[in-house]
């Protein structure tokens, strides 16, 4: 239950536009689900909670703009795989999930995000095998405490997968539409933390089909519409959306590897953001990570993509994106300017913004999240700066401490919507709801959740026995 919390005497990472200031020895007073006041010498409210932040860093929670939260049970599979392998051993595995498996996978994906300091996720929920798959994933999301835009998806659903492989030809069955309509009417969920969006990648469908479903989602009031894009591997959905008159600022384009300059300009002109996901992009082979490319960096945010493949924390994603991009600038400089050390043009502040205020802009919630400001929602994390990793760094430069030294273990407190979800480096109990907007049905700890997850993983593995990956790959990619 959200009450009042006073974060006392910490170093607040405070945004003024795109600049991040360090407010030393400052307090942050949270009342209900909002930040009430930032200042010095603030007093806790009667019956309010006091957290001593002396020597600690108080940061806005991170915003992950592209993730598939259901995939927890698939962890460990993809270490030596490229995109086409992952599509079969990862994405298509929703076929082997029953609704209950979706619940546990989704809940654990949300909790891992919270543990790692992520407070908002755009969930590309390509999991809709049945109404129950969607509602169970939504119930898990609402139960977790994470702020989420659950992007109800449409994807290739399988009818059969043994030594043979068959995709259901009916892309939008009746239940898909009626579930979408019911959920759209019932949203938001989880005390307004969870809003509904739409995820779609099927740009090979005829123009009128694409236009009809995107228009419908907007009429239903969906918050964000999201799609994967990578050039030249996928159809040019940016051009198509533009040509179809559908491109608007409620869209997030994930990846955008190798995006053409003309398409980058189109996105910027329409105020559409991209989500770079460095760790999957660097491994899976789709091409360049473009978040800091000059023609798109004003409209870049950062995402995680697959926690089945890699780490969930945005600290790692931001660090990887920053240093990779700096290296690429250097490579270009050495090639074009001879033996010259390049100027460092990508700074820590911009990298921090990628995971905070830029994420808020991407989801059109800059007035609510993405920075610590009076009146904004209380999505805040606290770093322990006296840890072996962070000690001394925070005294010198708090942004360097967070972006170059910290790891998940240094994130001591996570507050989302004014509710403490992690305290003293331990996850809080999880309140399981009886439906996405319902009453608390039970409470479980992480260790209980992990046991359910392991059982679910075994069931999924068993269902997958005898499924021929080569046949699936051939059907999807023509023998790649
Ligand atoms: Zn993805």
Image (cartoon, grey):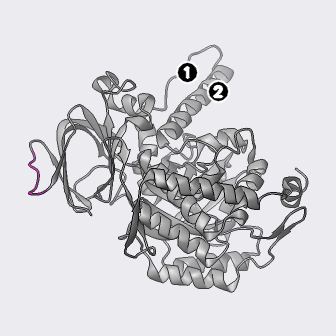
Q: What element carries label 2?
A: helix
| Cα distance between the residues tagged 1 and 2 | 9 Å
Residue at the spot 20% in from the left edge and 53% down from the top edge: 5
> Could you classify mark 1 by the number of other residues whose Cα lies within 10 Å: few (under 14), some (14-19), or many (20 or more)?
some
Q: Is residue 84 left or right of residue 101?
A: right
| Coordinates of residue 29 in the picture (x, y in percent) | 18, 51
Query: Tags 1 and 2 in contact by the CB under 8 Å rule?
Result: yes
Residue stretch in magenta:
42-47
Q: In this view, does 390 lie above or below 299?
A: above
Q: Is residue 43 magenta?
A: yes
37 vs 246, nearest the viewer: 37
| Coordinates of residue 289 in the picture (x, y in percent) | 62, 41
The answer to which quarter of the image holds residue 82 is top right
359 vs 138, nearest the viewer: 138
Predominant SS of the magenta segment: loop
Query: Can residue 402 be seen by looking at this rendering?
Result: yes
| Coordinates of residue 469 in the picture (x, y in percent) | 84, 54
* Residue pointed to by mark 2: 332
Q: In this view, does 412 lie above or below 361?
A: above
> Could you classify mark 2 by the number of other residues whose Cα lies within 10 Å: few (under 14), some (14-19), or many (20 or more)?
few
* Residue pointed to by mark 1: 342
**On-image quarter of the N terminus:** bottom left
Q: In this view, does 156 lie above or below 38?
A: below
Say whether mark 1 is within 8 Å of ligand 1: no
Residue at the spot 48% in from the left edge and 70% down from the top edge: 139
Q: Is residue 58 magenta?
A: no
């Amino acid at each position: 239950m959200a009450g009042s919390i006073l974060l006392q005497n910490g170093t607040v990472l405070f945004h003024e536009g795109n600049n991040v200031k360090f407010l030393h020895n400052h307090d942050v007073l949270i009342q209900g689900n909002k930040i009430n006041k930032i200042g010095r010498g603030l007093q806790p409210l009667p019956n309010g909670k006091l957290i001593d932040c002396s020597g600690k860093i108080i940061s806005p929670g991170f915003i992950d703009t592209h993730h598939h939260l259901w995939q927890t049970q698939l962890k460990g599979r993809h270490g030596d795989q490229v995109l086409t392998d992952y599509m079969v051993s990862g994405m298509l595995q929703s076929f082997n999930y029953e609704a209950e498996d979706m619940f546990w996978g989704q809940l654990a994906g949300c909790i891992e995000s919270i543990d790692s300091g992520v407070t908002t996720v755009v969930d590309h929920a390509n999991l809709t095998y049945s109404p129950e798959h969607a509602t169970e994933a939504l119930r898990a999301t609402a139960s977790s405490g994470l702020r989420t835009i659950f992007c109800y998806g449409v994807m290739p659903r399988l009818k059969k997968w043994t030594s043979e492989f068959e995709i259901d030809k009916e892309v939008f069955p009746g239940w898909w539409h009626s579930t979408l309509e019911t959920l759209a009417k019932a949203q938001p969920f989880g005390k307004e933390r969870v809003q509904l969006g739409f995820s779609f990648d099927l740009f090979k469908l005829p123009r009128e089909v694409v236009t009809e479903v995107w228009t419908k989602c907007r009429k239903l009031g969906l918050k964000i519409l999201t799609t994967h894009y990578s050039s030249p591997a996928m159809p040019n959905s940016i051009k198509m959306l533009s040509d179809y008159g559908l491109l608007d600022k409620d869209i997030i384009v994930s990846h955008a590897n190798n995006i053409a300059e003309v398409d980058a300009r189109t996105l910027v002109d329409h105020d559409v953001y991209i989500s770079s996901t460095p760790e999957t992009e660097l491994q899976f082979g789709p091409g360049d990570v473009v978040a800091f490319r000059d023609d798109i960096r004003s409209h870049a945010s950062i995402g995680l993509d697959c926690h089945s493949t890699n780490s969930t924390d945005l600290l790692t994603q931001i660090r990887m994106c920053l240093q990779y991009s700096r290296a690429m600038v250097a490579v270009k400089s050495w090639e074009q300017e001879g033996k010259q050390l390049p100027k460092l043009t990508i700074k820590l502040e911009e990298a921090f913004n990628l995971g905070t205020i830029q994420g808020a802009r991407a989801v059109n919630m800059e007035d609510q999240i993405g920075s610590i400001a009076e009146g904004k929602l209380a999505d805040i994390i606290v770093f322990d700066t006296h840890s072996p990793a962070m000690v001394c760094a925070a005294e010198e430069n708090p942004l360097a401490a967070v972006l170059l030294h910290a790891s998940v273990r240094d994130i001591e407190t996570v507050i989302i919507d004014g509710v403490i979800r992690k305290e003293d480096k331990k996850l809080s109990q999880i309140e399981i709801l009886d439906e996405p907007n319902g009453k608390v049905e039970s409470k479980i700890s992480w260790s209980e959740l992990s046991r359910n997850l392991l059982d679910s993983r075994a069931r999924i593995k068993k269902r997958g026995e005898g499924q021929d990956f080569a046949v699936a790959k051939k059907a999807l990619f023509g023998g790649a």
